[in-house]
Image (tube, rainbow, N blue to C red):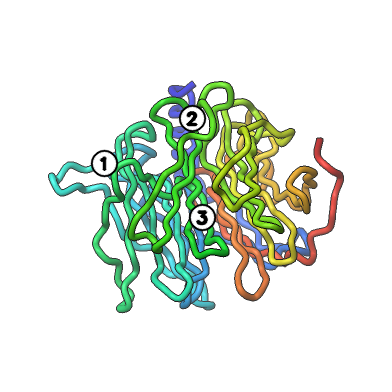
Amino acid sequence: MILNRLIFRRMLTQATKLRKPERSDEICHPAILSDAFIFEESSNAMSHASTIVESRDGLVAAWFAGTMESRPDVSIWVSRNSGSGWSTPIKVADGVMPDRKRYACWNPVLFQAPGGALWLFYKVGPSPKRWWGMCMKLGGDGTWDAPMRLPDGILGPIKNKPVQLANGDLLSPSSDESDGWRVHLERSSDMGKTWTRTDPLNDGRTVGAIQPSILHYADDRLQMLCRTKQGRIAETWSDDGGNIWSEVCLTSLRNPNSGTDALSLSDGRQLLVYNPSTHWRSPLEIASSVDGKTWQDVLTLADGAGEFSYPAIIQTADGLVHVTYTWNLSRIRHVVIDPTRLAPATPIG
C-alpha cells in the first residue's frame, strides 16, 4: 500500500511537470466568490497540507513543499494576501536541527492569537511515527522568530487549527502515530508558555483515528471529527468544555484515509470539508450540519481525476469562508465562499 502510494505520487508529480494544468475562473456555484491557485509556478515538485488564517494584516497561508513528502529538503512555505493577491511564496522554516542534521517538515498550522502574535506550528522528523513539534512566532517587524521545539510529548495541533475556549484556554486537536493512530488534546492556559496533554481518547486499533478538528456548540459542548483507517470519519464529544470526552466512534461519513477540516460558523452551522469516498481523494466536498449528527453535502469544491485533499477552512471577520486544499500534490488552491448562499441538499446517510 505504501509503495503503491509513493509510485502514484511520483507519476502524478511527473504528469503535472509535463503539462500546464487546465484552469478556469468561471464561477460554477453561486456561493463561490473566487477560486484560484495561490501560486502558478513553483520550484518544488510537491506542495501539500496547507493551512490558512486571518491575521491582523490580512490572510496568511502555509504548506510544506519539496521534492517529495518525507524527504529532508521538505520545508515550510508561506504566502500572504492583504487584499491585492497572494505574494510570492517564501520558505520560512526547514528541518535543520542544532546538530546540523536535516529532516522533513510536516503539517503546518497557523494560529492568530487574539491581540497577540501569529503562531506557526509544524512538525519535523523522518516520519509521522517519529516526528516532534515545533513552533515559530511572527515578530512585530514582520519577520519570523527562530524556531522553537515544543516540550517533549507535545506535538502541537497536528493538522487543524487550535480553538480558544471561553475561559481563555487554548485547545489543540492532536494525535500520535507512534503506537497505533490515537487522538489526544493539548491545552495551554497561558497562551502557549506551558502545555498539558490528555491521555489518548482511543486505543488506536479498534478505531485508528488521527488529525482531529474541533467544533463548538451551545453550553460548552465540543465535537471532534477525525480521519481514520476504517473508511469513515470518527467523532467524539465533550459536554464540559473539553475535559472529558466520549468514546471515539465511527460516523456514517465516508473517508478514504485522508485529512479533513471542520468549522463552526458564526450563525451556528457547522461545516466539514472532506472527500466523501472510501478509496479516492476526489471529489472534495463541503457538508453542513446544525447538530453535528445529520450532515448535508452543499458544495463540490473539486471533482474528477486527480487528488484534491488536505483542506483547511476558516471564517474571516467579514463572514466569508476561505478554504485551501492540495491540488494534485503540486499546488495549493484557495476558494472564497459566501456561506449564506450554501443551500441545503439531501442528507447524507
In this view, 232 is above or below 307: above
Residue under label 3, please give it. 161
Disc 2, SS: loop
Q: Amino acid at mark 3?
A: Lys
Which badge, 2 or 3, is on the more N-terminal residue? 3
**Residue type pointed to by label 2:** Trp
User: Quadrant of residue 165 in the image?
Assistant: bottom right
How far is mark 2 from mark 1, CA to CA?
22 Å
- Local SS, label 3: loop
The residue indicated by pointer 2 is: 181
Marks 2 and 1, the one that precedes in the sequence: 1
Q: Is residue 104 visible?
A: no
On the image, numbered disc 1 is attached to which residue?
103
In this rendering, position of residue 263 left or right of residue 1: right
Residue at horizontal 21%, vertical 48%?
A: 96
> Against 72, is 157 above or below?
below
